[in-house]
Image (cartoon, rainbow, N blue to C red):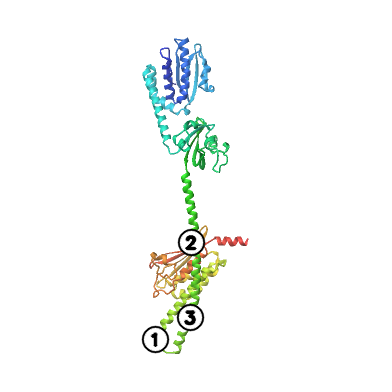
Amino acid sequence: MKLIELNIDSNYSIIDAREKFFVLLTDLGFSVKKAAKICVVISEITRSIYKKYINKKLIITLEDINNFYSLNIQFPKCFDMEKLNYFFDDSRIIKKNNNEYQIASLLIDKHKIPSLKKFVDSEKEKLMYIISANNVDELKRIIEEKTSEIIYSSKLLDSILNNMGEGVYVVDMNSNAIYVNNTCLELLGYDENELISNNMHLLIHHHKKDLSEYPAEECPILKSIQNKNSILVSNEVFWRKDGTCFSVEYNATPLIAENKVLGGVIIFRDISERIKAEEAIKKLNEELEQKVIERTQKLLEANKELESFSYSISHDLRAPLRHIIGFIELLSKKYTFEDKAAQYFNIITTTAKRMSQLIEDLLNFSRIGRASLKLTEVDLNEILRSLLTFFKDDIEKRNIQINIQTLPRIYADYILIQQVWQNLISNAIKYTSKCSNPCINIGFKKNKNFYTFYIEDNGIGFDMKYIDKLFNVFQRLHIDEEFEGTGIGLAITKKIIEKHGGKIWAEAKINEGAKFYFTLPIEYINEKNNLNN
């Protein structure tokens, strides 16, 4: 189907013919450069017609043929058809001859010029009207309009590129610069004429950061262009005209047209300040880490001194305290006292015994911090069975329901882990003493790197706003008149768990019970298996 027909005869000047055809080609989607080359040939053809065949016409048609558009040029036989190769790919030209004319048909793939179909559909009638009416003024207006649009777009693009904060330069396949923006010139210290048509690798990328030579075949920019892939490179250096260098981060993207690589576009930015900031942060972090190490060491030493002091004081207090308790008991047995004096002696004995228990607990707390772990394979189910026997009287007397999940074998210090369970079960029994239907649940969950154990009761519970005090030495959430204790049991439990590489925490509600969790690493078991193997 014929879409457009353009008839050029001797009534038109060569300039008119060229302008007509230029507008047609640019509207069809040809680049300005391509259209200009074609128009040069059209001018020669038109000139030949006017000289030798005054009454002959140059006929140009555009036809729709399936997946192609056929651009047909009919001209007198006097014209040398080989000149068409100047702007057409010879392999795509279909040449025909008749008695008076010869025809060259160029097949254009519709997919390669996507704007062509849109133009044909929307502008066909308008253009055919302009051409058929021989309206040269309208054609000139269109050319001026198109030229203005091109000039405006070019200026707009140039303004955008020159106002970018990053340097931009474009190179051909030989790494010679064909475009540079203002930021590029400012960062590198060159004038435009010193970069255009010169090899950018040799000018600004010739040496690495360590001052070793940078061979062109190793250059990521050239590799990016050759391999047709975009890259982002950080912390290399570009060299200024004055011989100094600066750290850069750059993007290199191949410049591709019609599946052919024409060169590459490089966008780069000066990251010297960022590198300095990162180095400063790194230095501060190193200094901070060193301070943390030093302060941690001082804290460990202080804790050791405190533990040693506590142990010494506690140990030294035990002997005189035992003497006090012993002499009071002797006096009570040998002499008879009045009711008031007997009450005083009873208070002294009770208080002394409580102080003795506090000292004993404090010694235990100090021993745990000083002693090393004696790791062995531990059957937790066996530990729980022995503890239930130990607490058998309280359990049967109060009819406490105890539900225990089968627990795993772990690798830990047997004595210390037994103390953990003893402390937690003792607390659960103690704090369910006012409950009519006491119940205790014990179980665990296995995670990737650790076991999470729990013990849950339906006792008195506690207020979660005091959770921070729960595991501290001598910190109690209930008064002695309600529940006896020294306030060291949970602190000892926490220290044992942390010594094994785990952690402990609790959840509770007042009068609804409490649930204690603690973790132990599975890696101890794996470590033992590796040793056995």
The answer to whether residue 358 is visible is yes
Which residue is at 48% across, 73% downward?
Answer: 361
Secondary structure of residue under mark 1: helix
Task: Residue 140: give x, y in percent of width and height.
Answer: 38, 20
| Closer-to-camera residue (68/396) | 68
Mark whose residue sits in front, 3 or 2? 2
Q: Which residue is mark 1?
A: 341
Q: Position of residue 192 (x, y in %)?
A: 47, 32
Q: Earlier in the sequence, mark 2 or mark 1?
A: 2
Q: Residue furthest bottom?
A: 335
Work out which residue is located at the far front of the displayed protein and give it. 242
Q: Amino acid at mark 2?
A: Arg
Is there a contact, CB below 8 Å, between mark 2 and mark 1? no
Point 48% across, 82% down: residue: 323
Three-letter amino acid code at disc 3? Answer: Pro
Frontmost of labels 1 and 3 is 3
Tell me the element at label 2. helix
Above-or-below relation of 275 to 88:
below
User: Which of the labelled discs sits on residue 124, or is there none?
Assistant: none
Disc number placed over residue 295 in the picture, else none = 2
Callout 3 secondary element: helix
In the picture, the quarter occupied by the C terminus is bottom right
Q: Closer to us: mark 2 or mark 1? A: 2
Q: CA distance from mark 3 to mark 2?
A: 38 Å
Q: Residues within 10 Å of mark 1 (few under 14, many from 20)?
A: few
Quadrant where the image shows the N terminus:
top left
Residue, disc 3: 320
The quadrant in which residue 56 appears is top left
Task: Confirm or deny contact between disc 1 and disc 3 (CB under 8 A).
Answer: no
Position of residue 297 measured from the top left corner of the image (x, y, whole percent):
51, 63
